[in-house]
Image (cartoon, rainbow, N blue to C red):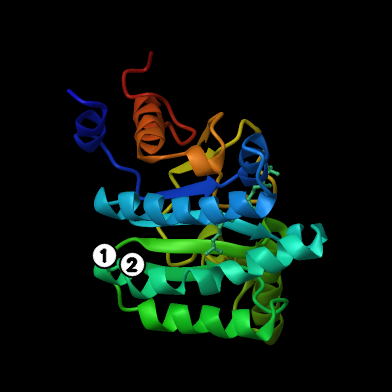
Amino acid sequence: MSLENRVLSKYIPEHIAIIMDGNGRWAKRIGMPRTFGHKKGSENLKDIALVCNEIGIKALSVYAFSTENWSRPKAEIDYLMALPAEFKEVFKGKFKDNDIRVIFSGRKDRFPKKVQELIIDVEEKTKERKGLILNICFDYGSYTEILDGVKEISKKFKKGDIKLDDITEDLMHDHLYTRELPRLDLLIRTSGEERISNFLLWQLAYSELIFVKKHWPAFNRKELFKALDNFQKRNRRFGGLKEDKS
Ligand code: FPP
């Protein structure tokens, strides 16, 4: 059986997350500027989102810009800030044809006005779509996400809208950016680094982690299927015991 058929005959994760690392190194290796790596990386994001949609994955969360990325050189930040606008044709074209919804997770208040407007517009225009939800984490940091959630819950507690015992895992989940998405099954990080880097810390509690050597622009359909195959071979216990007790 081919790799693809084997993977498709088994459990397909509902929600996967990707740290799209290595754009800069990929570009450097072929003697090109880092921004060329981001260009190829964003094209690759489009391709991988289409594959995820095709095989029935419900949500794909990607780390596109972290709360710490503001410390990069201005020219690189400007380039990354222009990517959502560059993607506009994809949102209206290929993603529309394939019913892919797009949401952005992150602070949203530090972007140039034009980027803020575009994000709101894309979320609004795609919100009725029923295919994959592409969750683009942009000015995203897990500490900020969790702290904002805790502050919201504290306000409700102070007002008397909730009691101490109402503060549960489910309530916390409902105060995260990912509240609409299924439980996170799998995180893939490209480019050989084995770190979480302030990404989806709460959501990752029982996810499988896969680190691959390929840089993000080179992480293609075959690499995705190899990662899914690896995921399907794992024995997820969620803190319990394996069924065969071995
Ligand atoms: C990490 O590689 C990658 C990023 C910081 C940016 C990733 C963004 C995209 C792939 C496109 C996002 C698309 C939209 C629509 C917003 P790096 O630059 O840290 O690479 P390096 O580790 O080799 O230096």
Q: Residue at x 60, y 35 (%)?
A: 191
Circle 2: residue type: Phe
Secondary structure found at label 1: loop
Q: Which image quadrant for residue 66?
A: bottom right
x then y, percent, for residue 56 = 26, 51
The residue located at (61%, 79%) in the rendering is 115
Decide if residue 153 is on the left or right side of residue 96. Answer: right
* Figure check: 74 above or below 120: above
Residue 67 in view (yes/no): no
Q: Quadrant of the C terminus?
A: top left
Left or right relative to 218: residue 165: right
User: Where residue 167 sits: x, y (%)?
Assistant: 60, 65
Give me the disc on residue 178: none
Q: How many marks overall? A: 2
> In the rendered image, which quarter is residue 195 located in?
top right
Counting from the top left corner in percent of width and height, residue 64 is at 59, 58
Secondary structure found at label 2? helix
For the N terminus, the image quarter is top left
Residue type at the position of mark 1: Asn
Which residue matches tag 2?
A: 95
Please, which residue is most extreme toward the top here?
A: 246
Residue at the extreme front of the image, as rendered: 31
Crowding near the residue tagged with mark 1, few <14, some 14–19, many ≥20 C-alpha atoms within 10 Å = some
Q: Tags 1 and 2 in contact by the CB under 8 Å rule?
A: yes
Circle 1 residue: 98
Q: From mark 1 to mark 2, how far is it between C-alphas?
A: 5 Å
Residue 106 sits in quarter: bottom right
Q: Position of residue 245 (x, y in %)?
A: 37, 17
Of the pair 194 and 96, the residue shown nearer to us: 96
